[in-house]
Amino acid sequence: MKSLLSSIDLVIECRDYRVPLTSRNPLFESSLDGKERIIVYTKRDLGGGARDARNEEVIQQWHGATRTMFVRNGKDEDGEYAGRKSVMKLLDELRAHAQARWKLVGHRVMIVGMPNVGKSTLLNALRAQGINKGKVAATGAQPGVTRKVSSGVKIVPSEDDIEGLDAHMRGKLKGVGGGIYLLDTPGVFIPYVPDAHAMMKLALCGSVKDTIIPPVMLADYLLYHVNLHSPTLYADYCSATNDIVELLTAIAQKTGRLGKGGAVDTEATALWMIQKWRTGQMGRFLLDQVDENALENAKIVEEGVAPSMNQARRLEREKRRERNRARGER
């Protein structure tokens, strides 16, 4: 990805709106330093309703002059893609950026982010709205679907392709040169996880494979957050409780997730509960605390976190190479 930056005109960095701080990867801050970018918070619809717009205002303040946008990922009541309006706004931004930097060979945009934050879904939506073409990037509920940097996928037609379009679209495409191409990339996980809370949040949002953390433990952490908002979110299954086994037992009995002899399948029920939350059917809320100083506080914590064992070994190998190189020069 770094080797391609010299040919990239703009970077779209995706973050999960439910974890606006935890889904931020400091690697991008250093690796993409100096490259113009747009920060897009995906899954906006899963982080609360329109009444929670205050969170958007605070998040936009974090980024100052950097363009910040919010995109919905689900479907509306008619079964249509709910993020159409926000995707169209993003397309307008990309067109304006291309028009200000006309290139005959086309405008190249790279999309980056943590695993499973919705990069490929956004690419497909941009392509559908930009050139009315179908799905081109594979998507999935688990991280790791995208395995390599894709070749550029056209999301906005070139000036040569505007024949036959209405006057409004011709006006929008005037000056875009050779069109706009988007490069999808694999999710890049943070180099170290600062604490257990961060790991659990990333796992709940699907940035970590479900096999890494025991489902019951993850469901227990979810119950903690659900109770912070309202125990009524699971009132159809159980009265208010802090006991995850009690809740899972009640859910299993209501939904028929029972094994031989009527035994409760706690793992399967825990995964079912987690998936209900991921799709917005057991509350829509943020897992991170959002306030004016949250981003700066997160950066301070990151600076104080010790490197992982792998990082420490890598640093030691680099120091050893430097020492050997210095001896050779003597």
Image (tube, rainbow, N blue to C red):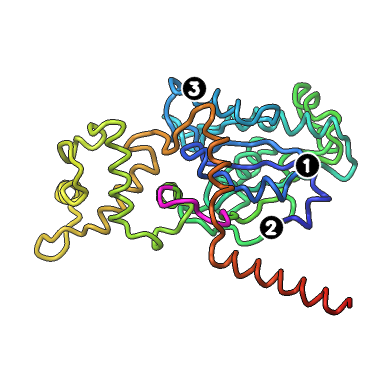
Q: Is residue 275 above or below residue 291?
A: below
Q: Amino acid at mark 2?
A: Val
Residue 282: x percent and y percent? 31, 38
As for residue 194 lying within the magenta part, the answer is yes
Residue 226: which quarter of the image? top left
Residue 321: which quarter of the image? bottom right
Which residue range is magenta in the image? 190-197
Answer with mark 2 or mark 1, whichever residue precedes in sequence. Answer: 1
Residue 247: x percent and y percent? 19, 46
Whole-number angstrom distance, CA of label 1 to CA of label 3: 30 Å
Quarter placement of the N terminus: bottom right
Q: Would residue 303 be found to the left or right of residue 79 on screen?
A: right
As for residue 208 lying within the magenta part, the answer is no
- The mark closer to the camera, 1 or 3, is 1
Q: Pointer 1: what residue?
A: 34
- The mark closer to the camera, 2 or 3, is 3
Q: Pointer 2: what residue?
A: 149
Residue shown at 80%/40% (left/top)?
A: 179
- For residue 53, the mark is 3
Q: Amino acid at mark 3?
A: Ala
Residue shown at 68%/30% (left/top)?
A: 67
- The mark closer to the camera, 2 or 1, is 1
Q: Amino acid at mark 1?
A: Gly
Q: Would residue 45 be found to the left or right of residue 64 on screen?
A: left
Proximity of marks 2 and 1: CB atoms separated by less than 8 Å: no
Q: Residues within 10 Å of mark 3 (few under 14, many from 20)?
A: few
Q: Secondary structure at mark 2?
A: loop
Answer with mark 2 or mark 3, whichever residue precedes in sequence. Answer: 3
